Amino acid sequence: MSILKFRLLFLSISILLSTTFLTNVYAKTNLNLSTSEQHWLKLHPGITFTGNPNWLPYEAFDENGNYLGIVAEHIKLIENITGLEFKKSPDKSWTESTEKAKQGLVDVLSETNDSDLKSHLNFTTPYISNPIVIAMHNSQNYVEAISKIKNKKIALIKDYGYAAKIRRKYPGIAFITVDNIQDGLIAVSTRKVDALLCTLALCSYTISELGLNNVKITGKTEFDTKLAFGVQKNLPELLSILNKAINEITKQQQIILDRWIKDKFIERVDYTLLIQVVIISLILLSILILRARRLRQELNDKTKTEKELRYLNQSLKLHREHTHLGAIEWNMDFEVVDWNNAAEEIFGFTKEEMLNKHATDRILPVDRTVVEQIWNDLLRTKVSNRSTNQNITKDGHTILCEWYNTPLVGQNGEVVGVVSLVSDITEQNKLQTKLVQSDLRFRSLFNLSPDPAWIIENNKFVDCNQAAIDMLGYNNKEEFINTHPSKLSPEYQPDGEDSFSKAERMMQLAKEKGTNRFEWVHTRANGNNFFAEVTLSLITLENRPLIYCGWRDVSERKSSESELKEYRAHLEELVQERTAELAAARDEAEHANKVKSEFLSHMSHELRTPMTAIIGYAQILELDMDGGSESSLNNINEILNASYHLLELINELLDLTKIEAGRLQLRMDMVSLDDALKESLTLVKPQADKREIDIVDNVSGKKYLIYADFIRVKQVLVNLLSNAVKYNIEHGHVSLTCEETENNKLKISITDSGEGLTDDEISKLFVSFERLNPVNNVEGTGIGLVISKHLVELMGGTIGISSIPGEGSTFWIEFSLEKEV
């Protein structure tokens, strides 16, 4: 049995015996729990717990999830004396453990009492205190304090609670951070750092486990670390119970600590006594010096060689265990004799699962012909080789691995074993395959593309497609590639810049931005120039940075753009000329309208006075002719009718003039439709009675209010009603209706039984002085509807007509409905 196995067996037996002894002792302990604490224990016999998964000797979870270490043994004692069951929740890292505690996924966390988690947890009283010590190379003597080595490279372990305290105390020291205790001690062993600060227990345990015979603990610091339990803040009873249990177990916990802590730090030496002892020893040893000189000389060479070999072997071991490559050692029967951590990560098998196992039992595929040939060649030639082949992982996946195999040759020249370095290149191979496929697809698209393109490397053509050859008029690819780039462009571009200088600048922009698009003038093989739209793109083919140049002939587009530009300029000239003409015509029209309005207004006023006189004298003459002849009376009646008609025309002309000149004043207010309609019907009724036209009124009595000018509303209604009577058939009818529309409007409709209107006639209705199909010699001015339309629109309303020839017409007006009264 090896020494290491014996030590592990002895440690396991001692842990079992001491734990059993302490359990029996504490089983009889009375914690004096309160009533509430006893009640809480009954309701919560089990609590969830986690700790650091890799922090021996304090605590760790092994590969089977078993919890072990100093903290684990303390928990067993607490379980025994409280009756609690700590349900372990293993994690892969300390970060995962702390996240569980922060999120409340566990009840208790093993941690130091100076933890940053105090905002999430309440901590028990400490139950273990361990000093922070200084680990250095074994050539270093005792160190009194950190300040004595402040100029050296000192390492601290990442995320450990005491590290923050040390950094605050020594802000002037540029501490180096290592991921874990193993990395820190290896850095000391290999002299990458001068010192590592860590706890005594953790440091001494790890030095022993790593077998580092050139690292030792050289002193202690003024700092220490204290272990406690962090309890969720909503469990005060549990915190109290744990504190009482800790008070009991800390009385006799030295047995646990002595079993796990392997070394003590070096204490200060009394050099006075040491000097005395050395002097006496030198006197005694001087007698033996001459006799031992020859023997020592013989041993020196051997000892030096052994030290060098031991150091080399140690360095090799450290490198093998921490390399990212799988390191495997085989015996002559192709069986594993060593297997590092990287090999375990690649294949999934642990070292214990692989030791003394043949490769065919674990990691080789069914077809082993190639691997066996490689093995036989290696043993026969005794020369290192490299191979790539498929392997099988523990979970059954097939992976592609790259192997570097070296035979181990003994003193007699025979191969005694093989060492292999292996890496998983599955993903790398997939990526390489994708790159190759991508290159093939690119080349296919490049060669078959209808758009001309070429590839430039270091300002030289290295490839082009057939479309470029045809477009530029060359005979073949070789002729094109051998053509100097300067021959593909005129000396200067249209902007006046030198073509060669501009091309270099454009390619530099493409390299910086990844792509660059611009217009360029190219030259064909026959010397003709043409415009092209060019796109430069930075690409990588077979790890070579290249410029991809794609372009297309845009000569026709440029020609069209030039023509369009000229046409646009000509069109702008035409527009300016036409605008000037329209402005002049508008001014002329405005002047004419102004003259017309002034003339009509003047004429209306001038004609109104004589017309009034004519009507007055005609009426007097009619009175004087009372009893006169019938023909005389008819003549006088004709004079009166013509005068009335002319006066009506004058009044409407005056209204139209005011409207067109914008001088018509409206008195907008709330208008009762019922009142306006009644007065309008009163004015039209004699005319309707004379022609025996029946007016059916379906609106009067409905109390609607509209916002309008009362006089002008009545004027519009009278005009529409009068037209419906005048242009109706004998003994016809006129009907009035109204309705509320969806957009809060009031629509008033006047329908007659006349002959109706065609679409062509409707289009002329609202044109001044147009009279359509006058019946019965009805007199009219021809501007009534025009004025009505203007008035309605000035009051914010709308007017319209619908008609069916032979059946009649409906005129309607629409105003905003204010409210019903």
Image (cartoon, grey):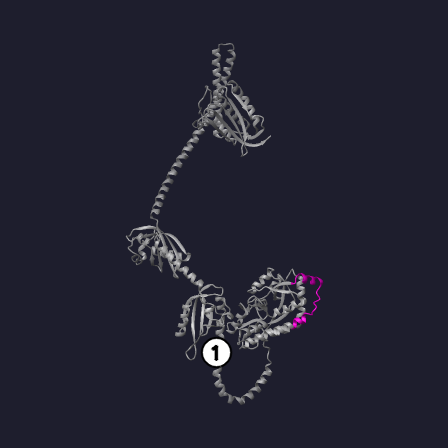
Task: From this view, report whether residue 380 is shown above or below residue 458.
Answer: below
Q: Main secondary structure of the magenta part?
A: helix
Q: Secondary structure at mark 1?
A: helix
Q: Is residue 31 magenta?
A: yes
Q: Is residue 367 visible?
A: yes
Left or right position of 318 against 499:
right
Front residue of 343/442: it is 343
Classify residue 73 by image quadrant: bottom right
Q: On the image, numbered disc 1 is attached to which residue?
A: 309
Tag count: 1
> Residue 798: horizontal and vertical position, in percent?
50, 31
Which amino acid is tagged 1?
Answer: Leu
Q: Residue at x 57, y 86 (%)?
A: 279
For the N terminus, give its image quadrant: bottom right
Q: Position of residue 688 (x, y in %)?
A: 52, 20
Say if the magenta span includes residue 730. Answer: no
In this view, the residue in front, 790 or 609, is 790
Front residue (pair 430, 219): 430
589 sits to left or right of 26: left
Q: Tell me residue 395's x, y (percent).
A: 49, 64
Q: Quadrant of residue 2?
A: bottom right
Q: Is residue 297 above or below residue 814?
A: below
User: Can you say which quadrant of the picture contains the C terminus?
Assistant: top right
Residue visible at 58% across and 87% down? 280
| Residue 174 x %, y % | 54, 68
Q: Which residues are magenta?
A: 21-45
Please state which of residues 721 and 521 is positioned toward the viewer in this rendering.
721
